[in-house]
Amino acid sequence: MWSTGPNIADGDVIIVWLTRDLIQPLTVEAGKDFNSRFGNYKHDDFIGTPYGSKVGARSGRGFIHLLRPTPELWTMALPHRTQILYHADISFITSWLNIKKGSKVIEAGTGSGSFSHSVIRSIGSTGHLWSYEFHEARETKAREEFARHGFSDIVTLTHRNVCKDGFTVADTVDALFLDIPAPWDAIEHAKLALRKDCITRICCFSPCIEQVLRTVTALNEHGFTDITMYETLQRPHDVARIPAPKSIAATTEKLKIAEVKREERRLQQIADNENRRQPKPKSPNKRKRADEEDDEGQEDGGKKAKTHKAEDTAELMLNGGEQTNEGSVSVSRVIPEVRGHTSYLTFATLMPIPPVRGPPAAEATPAETPDGGNAQTASGS
Amino acid sequence: MDPQPEASTSTGVIKSGDNVLVRSPNGDIRAVKADKDTNISVGRQGSFHANEIIGHPFGFTYEIFSKKELKIIPPKTLNEVEDTDATNELINDGQFVQPLTITEITALKQAGVHADEIIKQQIAAHANYELKTEYSKEKYRKRKEAKYSKSFTTIEPTLFSVCEYWFNKDKNRIRDIRNDTLAQMLNSANIRPGGRYLAVDDASGLVVAGMLSRMGGEGRVITICDTDSPPAYPVMGIMNLSKDEQKIMSSLNWATAEEDYVPVVPPSELSPEEIRSDRHKSRLRKRKHINDALTETREELFSGRFDALIVATDYDPYEVLTTLKPYLSGSANIVVQSPYVSILADLVNKLRGPGFLAPRLIENWHRRYQVLPGRTHPTMNTSGTGGAYMHVMKVYVSFHISKCRAPTACRYDDPDAQAAESRRVHSRKKVKVGEPAQTSVAPETKVVVQVEDPSQTTGAAPEESASTAMDIIVSTDPEVSNTLASASTGIELEEEAEVAQVAMAVDETS
């Protein structure tokens, strides 16, 4: 398993947090360098540093955080070989399938190992994961990764197409997870792999509704019950602190004053125009011009008044803002673009074989149920 | 075939004394206790003898014939419904269609007529039944079955079924934590067998139940509660956790979780003359046991290095976090849940400082689908909210501009870390009951600053400064900054502020 020590040691797998969008896994090796656009570092500087440390670049510009790997960080940092499962789906599937310490679990396919890491963490050293991948190169990569992370004892990785060849264990696992293009072809194999002495659970992960329908039919035909389907998504929020919303009271007062001022100004302009007209009867030319001016003047006045008004309002807004901007509030809203769909999660349970005891009446019908799925349809009516 | 490892811990079989969730045909779920030789009532369907189900695996559906006679009925499978041309064109509301009266039906029931027979008779008497579409017919039959069938299904109280049960029963008591949110909280906190965790659970114990059920008796959980007696975690009660699974949990309250506080406990050690009787002696022994356990739990908390903290409380989450943060290790996960996004938004804003990395506020959207052949659609009613949570990681306040050839004294530059360190040294000493709790000794903060050319610290390219050796600690923590200021005679304060600014600027980008 990943290191649980307080300090980073040579050979540890760590997560380098550069930014929220740039998170990288790293195996610490003495003597090596780590270069990024947030500076240059030496692995030697990491060794002995407590997990969770902020480390400054050698150049003095920029820094990074060195974190202890978790399956959740791994999901954010891992090299994508396929489309991967994310936190919300992984968590919900783990919970529905009742995966916990000691669980025996099957997953197909391994893909990029996002789900595998989470399951391995949850089942611990007393549990076991059988993981199947039909793509050879991906299987090799995953095998290297599991070995590097110290998971080899907990996970058995097999290169095979489970739809054709089935699983390598029978009557063994508590939970089974299928993330393959045609899960309906693997249902009968799944039934063989699940243990029969207690309730077991299956989840099929398919992005398209048509896949879900075919899967549901196959599950039903093979005697799985409690078939249900979920969709689970996250709505991450953007959080900010903004000025508290302003009161309209101050603005109202300002507007009232502004109205009075504007009226005064208008009256003043009329008075000014009156004055200009009065003492200028001398030259007719001039008078004519004055008349023109008068007309224009009034228009100008109007414009001016408007300008004044605009300025006043602006001023008022500023003042108003200052006056009422007491304190700030924390706000949040869902980020503008969120993941709208990942996959449909189809779940079902497989009932155990009923115990061979109690009144004979109790044994008669159910004895056939676990094997002959078709026998159960009779009960539907 | 691969070699098969030993059997799983969960047996999935009903034992005497187990809690069992029982689902009625109409979907109602109730929690019952399967104590040997007792009767279990399942409401309208009647009651039965517990011994009839003890020893069976969970999950069967039973029909009640009499108290002593249950019959396992095979689970229902989905039926294809044939499409017909029938419509509701000729069916009007309010029409008299059912001549069979309630009295007649009750009489049938009392006469012990089987549910299927009653339904048959109702269908035969129904005036418009044949006009219905096949879908509608099935719906009708199902509704009647739910009404008359004397059957029930046992459900294993797993974390999922228990959360769902409480969410439907009384979501206020579990702070609106829906299954999807709970699962994400546990995963975000990296709950695993063998981990060491702190929890503040005012959600009736749902969160703690989740942690313990996942850990399977391996690891450690310390919960902090607000009562002077051990907390009642009613949700935990119906999880069928074994003693081994529960014993990894200890609880403190907000007073006993304070380092300087000296818990007021009755004396457990008296001189031989004072001991009045054997009963008195055994009472003292018990008391000593309790007192010792409290001291040990406190020491354990104060020595820190916990891997995660999960908080679901009405108390100020920021205060809770600042109180418990010193006991978390670097890179620890912190998860805070609240029914109210606004409380978490406020918290996120407060955590935008040093010491915390990348607070994220998540609300979930979740819905279930009906998947009947030809009738697949989301359920008409769905839960509008399942609570929100925030995740953040603890990181060390300061950062180390690394120029040194080897890791140096500046590694432990986080006050939290040092408090935990010094605490660890103390905790090795034996602490007697009643002795004042040891306060953490403020550690010396050693700061080494050797700068030949201050300009190089602020923004020079790596090549330029390659030859200069320096150790600098830049800290946004006021205490450390002061120490730094007094130590850094070589650098002008402005210069230093700039370094800090650079640090902040980069911080913002991350």
Image (tube, grey):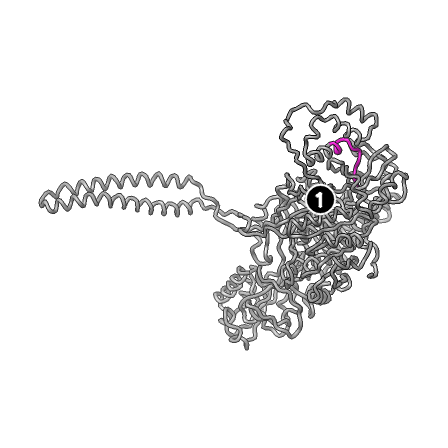
Q: In the figure, B460 relative to A208: above or below?
A: below
Q: Observer-nearest residue: B326 or B368? A: B368
Q: Observer-nearest residue: B483 or B393? A: B393
Task: Give residue B343's position: percent from left, percent from top.
Answer: 58, 46
Task: Give residue B421's position: percent from left, percent from top.
Answer: 68, 62
Amino acid type at circle 1 is Cys
Query: At 11% from the left edge and 47% from the top edge, which residue is drawn?
Result: A285
Instruction: Write down the residue under mark 1.
Output: B163
Q: In the figure, B476 relative to A379: above or below?
A: below
Query: At 28% from the left edge and 44% from the top edge, which residue is drawn?
Result: A305
Q: Quadrant of the C terminus of chain A?
A: top right
Task: Give residue A197's position: percent from left, percent from top.
Answer: 84, 49
Q: Observer-nearest residue: A16 or B26? A: B26
Task: Give residue A326's position: percent from left, percent from top.
Answer: 47, 46
> Could you classify mark 1 by the number of other residues whose Cα lies within 10 Å: few (under 14), some (14-19), or many (20 or more)?
many
Residue A148 makes an appearance in the image: no
Image-quadrant location for residue B23 = top right
Element under disc 1: helix
Tell whether position B17 is magenta.
no
Left or right: residue B489 compared with residue B100: left
Per the rendered image, the range of residues in magenta is: B144-154
Left or right: residue B70 compared with residue B419: right
Residue extending farthest front: B85
Q: Observer-nearest residue: B150 or A210? A: A210
Left or right: residue A266 compared with residue A338: left
Query: At 74% from the left edge and 62% from the top edge, which residue is drawn?
Result: A160
